[in-house]
Structure formats: C-alpha cells, structure tokens
Amino acid sequence: MKSSPDDWTEQARAVLDASAQGLDAATLSRLNRARQQALAAATPTRPALRWTRRLAIATSLLLAVTIWWPDSGPVPTAPNGPPLSPEDAELLADGALEMTDDPEFYAWLDADADHNG
C-alpha cells in the first residue's frame, strides 16, 4: 500500500525532530542562523515592482515634457477664398453642376482662358 505525500512528510518531520532533540544549543543556534540566511536569500526581489516604478517615472517625465514644451505657434490653415454669392450657393444647393461632368466644358474653359490671357 502506498503512503500519501502528507504521511511521508509527517514521518520525515518526526524523524528530524527526534534527531534535533539531541543537538546542543550552539549547533541549534548555527542551524537557525543558516536557515534565516537561506530564507532571506530565497525571498523574491519583486522585479515587477521595480519596473512599475521606472515606468511611472518615465510616464511622468513624458507628460511633463509634453505639457511644458514650447508652442511652435498657430497651426497654418487653408486660406479663405472670397465669400460665396447667394446665386452660387443656390446652384450648389440645387445640384446644378452637371456641366462639370462634361469634358467639352473644360476644353471651352481652357480655350477661353487662353483667349482672355
């Protein structure tokens, strides 16, 4: 019959406790100090916390630079043309621009521009 891991652990604990009963105080003290040093060395250093701090600092610096960076002035915009006359606005609203679909219209405009200078 197989024993469970808990049974094996309890048996090992009992054997080790019985053997520790016969040790003197100086040896027990040395064993305790060695155990404390091993536990301190095995404690995780939490590298995720270190990276989180670094990321927070970098983000704060980036935000500060973004806020305090000198402004280069207004953003250029497209020039405003002459205002649209009411007649032209009415033509646009009615959709009466079928002449722009005609290539002959563009040829006429080009010829007229050449003729008028």
Image (cartoon, grey):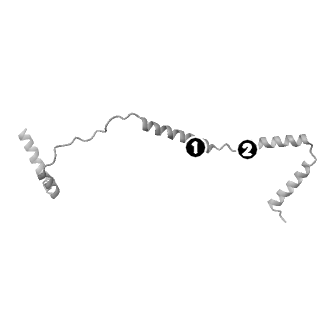
Q: Is residue 17 above or below residue 40?
A: below
Quadrant that contains the C terminus: top left
Q: Residue at x 22, y 40 (%)?
A: 79
Q: Which residue is mark 2?
A: 42
Q: Residue at x 17, y 56 (%)?
A: 93
Q: Mark 1 vs mark 2: which is more N-terminal? A: 2
User: In the visual, does 106 lie left or right of 54?
Assistant: left
The answer to which quarter of the image holds residue 45 is: top right
Q: Position of residue 56 (x, y in %)?
A: 54, 42
Q: Position of residue 111 (x, y in %)?
A: 8, 44
| Total marks in image | 2
- Mark 1 lies on a secondary structure that is helix
Quadrant that contains the N terminus: bottom right
- Mark 2 lies on a secondary structure that is helix
The residue lying furthest to the bottom in this view is: 1
The amino acid sitting under disc 2 is Ala
User: In the visual, does 67 lie left or right of 29?
Assistant: left
- Few, some or many residues within 10 Å of mark 1 (<14, 14–19, 20+): few
Q: Residue at x 57, y 43 (%)?
A: 52
User: In the visual, does 20 lie left or right of 35?
Assistant: right
Q: Is residue 26 above or below residue 2?
A: above
The amino acid sitting under disc 1 is Thr
Q: Position of residue 68 (x, y in %)?
A: 43, 35
Camera-nearest label, 1 or 2: 1
Q: Which residue is mark 1?
A: 52
Q: Position of residue 17 (x, y in %)?
A: 88, 51
Foreground: 33 or 11? 33
Disc 1 to disc 2, how far (Cα)? 22 Å
The answer to which quarter of the image holds residue 67 is: top left
